[in-house]
Image (cartoon, helix red, strand yellow):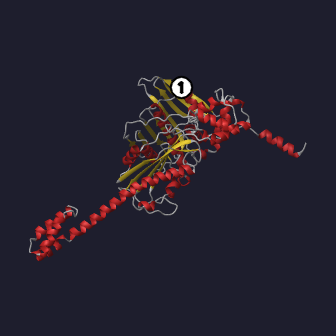
Amino acid sequence: MAVEQRVAERMAKDMKEISISEFFEKNRHLLGYENSTKALITIVKEAVDNSLDGCDEAGILPNIVVTLKQIGVDRFKIVAEDNGPGIVESKIPFAFGKMLFGSKFHRLKQSRGTQGIGISGAILYSQLTTGKPAKIISSTGGKIHEFELMIDTVQNEPSVASHITHTNKERWHGIKIELEAEGNYIERYQSIPEYLRQTAIANPYAHIVYNGPNGTLKFDRTTNIVPKQPKEIKPHPYGIELGILRRMLAMTRTKNLRAFLMRDFTRVGSRSAEQIFRLAKLESSRKPKSLDAEESERLHKSLQMVKLIAPPTNCLSPLTEQLIENGLKKELNAEYFVAVTRPPSVYRGNPFQVEVGLAYGGDLNPNSAAILYRFANKVPLLYHQSSCAITKSVEAVDWKRYGFQHPNSSVPVGPLVILVHFASVWVPFTSEGKQAIATYPAIMKDIKLALQDAGRKLAKFVRQKKQARDKQLRRQLFERYIPELAGSLSKLTKKEKNSIISNLEEIIKAGGSRISESKKIKKEKEE
């Protein structure tokens, strides 16, 4: 037997399948657990995002309580509770103890989570660093179910240690999750309090309480209006890649290609379907599953060639200009606020919308770099700022036009807070940690246009403020010399000094509009 064959056979024996849980167990940094400080923030983030998503879908005003207690040198107990709809008993172990298990991945509508690995990733990190199971308590309004579970990483399946059922006299509904994890607690920009503060800005209808190691923080809701829920849409032909199209052709329940295009896609009508068939040289009565590789490729090319209406945008749930201003006003003591919501746009067949809010002056530091708040589907992005499309778009704007210092390749300098919200049915994050948006040109263009629109409105206010300040300085200067001027005029006109002072003060109060008084003084001087 040749040496090469023996090596190949030995290698073949070592080959085996790994589960997604095993992969992330070894690569936890991809989920946002690259250091102990960020790990605590990520755990809280995943729990709060799940709570907000659940409350939004049920049309419930969120009440969320997060508790963080240090129980060792580098160990913390994290508890997060909400008043959402809860999860039915049979799905609880899988929702928390199985990766890539969820209801949002295949839906085309805006939501905070989509991948099904967020909260299960937190439980994986918890058991990896402490070896203890997570406790999940949930109720849909009936009985309360309490689970203790871990993740079997080899099988990517939940391992339930215990399941207890309690009576629910108070008809409580929601989810409460408790787990222990290693971590390092801080309170500065990239911290749990900052994440919750920014979450409160983008979700002003939520009431959030944080019980931290250094006391309690409360973020009260400023509105009782739950945002309108986005609608799920079908995929748009412009965003479909060849491999996905072939899978859709194989799995569709429609009986012919005409029904397939019109029912499984959005914005494809009978007329545009006929154009597609003509370009692809296919019969509309063909069964979708009967297409071979060449025919499916022709169909894919034809889908991109026919002019179609952009996908509907009711799948999005923007913050709106009013809520952006309310959120900024609630958390910032600034002098001026402005918000801009751009019309929806499309990239790769996916609808998206960009919103911008600016806060200026007040208690903001005039000598430091502007503060940038980045959001994706109402979730704050605290890390990887430099590699994010939002940051690069802010740096690409010429802020000097709007009255700010603007060093090269940097954010502007001045008393300014910049908020950018990116809403989409599919956010192109740069990694599973979901902390930065990929630099698609179409996305960056829209962000830049929104920033420029808001910048023009702010510049108008800044100019008016400067003009008012200059006018006030001129007035103060004139007021300073009124007594001397009145004394000189009194000697020249032989009029009473106090009377002249009174007239001059009246002119100033009138803003220089009382020209007749000015002429009267001039006439007295000539006499």
Position of the C terminus, as image quadrant, is bottom left
Amino acid residing under circle 1? Glu
254 vs 383: above or below: above
Observer-nearest of 159 and 398: 398
Residue 426 % position (x, y): 56, 41
94 vs 524: above or below: above
147 vs 331: above or below: above
- Residue 377 visible in the current orientation: yes
Name the image quarter holding residue 244: top right
SS for dot 1 = helix
How crowded pointer 1 is (Cα within 10 Å; few <14, some 14-19, many 20+) is rated as some
Q: Is residue 246 left or right of residue 172?
A: right
Observer-nearest of 449 and 336: 449
Observer-nearest of 162 and 47: 47
The residue wearing badge 1 is 89
Q: How many marks?
A: 1
